[in-house]
Image (cartoon, grey):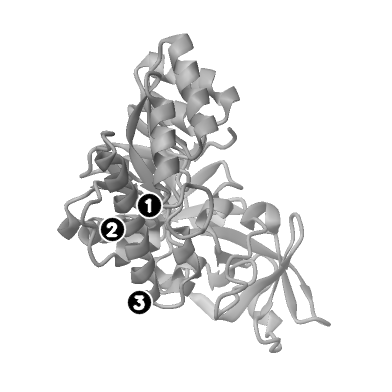
Amino acid sequence: MTLAELETPALLLDRARLESNLARMRAALAPHKVDLRPHLKTAKNVEVARLMTAGWSGAVTVSTLKEADQFFAAGFADILYAVGIAPNKLPHAARLHAAGARLGLIVDSQEAARQVAGFGRDHGVQFPVMIEIDSDGHRAGVRPGDAELLRAIAEALAGGAELAGVMTHGGGSYGATSPQAIADHAELERAGAVGAAMILRESGFACPVVSVGSTPTALFARHLDGVTEVRAGVHCFMDLVMAGLGVCGVQDIAISVLASVIGHRRDEDWLIVDAGWMAMSRDRGTQNQRVDQGYGLVCDAAGNPLDDLVVVSANQEHGIVASRRGAPLDLARFPVGTMLRILPNHACATAAQHGRYQVLENGRPVGEWERFGGW
């Protein structure tokens, strides 16, 4: 099969770029002597998951219990569900546990800890539980220095759950403006998690696991003293947000959406393609970066960026391609049927719009890898 035989829009995965990105993460973490527990929410695919875990312990991170089901069925048994647990999900989690999964849960409050422990006592299940730490004010979690709350959560878990450790996500690094700033976020993330673990240990609680992670901080951390594992996910594919942060180059982005030119607006200097927000997602993650990539950066069919063409607007099934600077286009270069590739702002969001990857080797489709979605 050739690219020209694919129906568009289609999600392309360049295997060589994928494997290069994974090798870079292995090399970055090797000096730190930590494990990688990759986040599989980006991939949602067993073949990619196996490549991401190669050379590591095989522990993984997920963001939905459906992901936990799918990856456990594929042989991944050590799974961290890295979203605060809701009580209505505990029976589902218990079924996974009964089937043999070591499914870790996270909490950041006494209330949630009591619910997990109470369910555990009532149903004879001992979940491993991580306390989520808010190391940078980005999202959920306990402030690293809040010793009183840390101890209270640990006490609430006693007798009904296993305190497995602490975890944090350096999401604030996505707003960094330089490699130095990313490295500073990595240290903030590390110090917050390690400090919280020390408080728990000094209070008499076992805290064997100290888990940190984001793709930027994992790649730019100066040291990871006191950390036992790192979680990262988008490093497998990379995207325009990562490129805008300086974490990767545009040439490292492993996924793209293949689209066809379906029309022109000569009065507006637009190309119309058959990849709208249903194919690209509505994510505008580069909007506040130095370079706004619209709904995606446009490349030729071989994956080479085309001047400064971006998807400037998107409807459900229509993408509007134009010059970022409003320069006139030579529309004759792009007759109807021309195939273009569009690089995504956010790999997770764009991939989530598709049911399969068209896997490329040496620029040619060699097979399909199924994806799954939902909760």
Question: Please, is residue 35 above or below residue 340 in the view?
Answer: above
Q: Is mark 3 on a helix, strand or loop?
A: helix
Q: Position of residue 62 (x, y in %)?
A: 44, 38
CB atoms of marks 2 and 1 within 8 Å: yes
Question: Please, is residue 329 above or below residue 213 in the view?
Answer: below
> Residue at coordinates 74% horizontally, 60% vertically from top-left?
318
Regarding residue 21, the answer to whether it shows in the image is no
Query: Which three-letter amino acid code belongs to the residue tagged 2?
Result: Met
CA distance for labels 3 and 1: 19 Å
CB atoms of marks 3 and 2 within 8 Å: no
Q: If you read the primary sequence from the N terminus, does the residue marked by circle 3 or circle 1 appear first?
A: 3
Q: Mark 2 points at which residue?
A: 25
Q: Mark 3 or mark 1: which is in front?
A: 3
* Figure quadrant of residue 27: bottom left
Instruction: Look at the image and tell me in which quarter the C terminus lies.
Output: top right
Q: Where is residue 95 in the image (x, y as percent from the top left)?
A: 46, 16
Q: Mark 3 points at which residue?
A: 180
